[in-house]
Amino acid sequence: MMGPGFAAAGCGPIGLLIGLLLVGLLIYMLKNRKKSDGSNLPDSSKAMEQLKMRLAQGDITPEEYQKMKDIVSK
């Protein structure tokens, strides 16, 4: 006789296939979740990063930066 497992639970090869598909789906989702290009950041974080870059490049003055920072952080 076979020991306990999918077959003993009445699932048979179909249950094994479903289990493997679920594990595969979980692995796929975890792999795609780790890809981070900043698109997972909240909008305010993206805006703050852009403000910092503009200040560093000299596109805006520190006063303009502070005003915009106050607006974004609300």
Image (cartoon, rainbow, N blue to C red):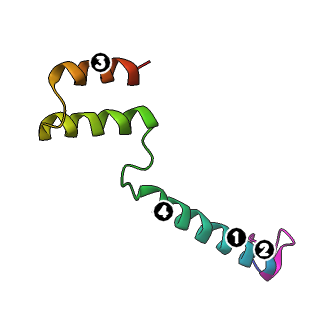
Pointers 2 and 1 in contact (C-beta within 8 Å): yes
Tell which of 42 and 26 is nearer to you: 42
The answer to if 46 sits in the magenta stretch is no
Q: Nearer the viewer, mark 3 or mark 1?
A: 3
Magenta span main SS: loop
Q: Which mark is residue 67?
A: 3
Residue assigned mark 4: 32
- How far apart are the alpha carbons under marks 2 and 3? 60 Å
Whether residue 1 is visible, yes or no, is no
Q: Is residue 34 left or right of residue 3?
A: left
Residue assigned mark 2: 15
> On the image, which quarter does residue 20 sit in?
bottom right
Give, as a single range, the part of the protein colored magenta: 3-13
Give residue 29's position: percent from left, percent from top.
55, 61
- Please, what secondary structure does the residue beneath circle 1 have? helix
Sequence-wise, which precedes: disc 3 or disc 1? 1
The answer to if 7 sits in the magenta stretch is yes
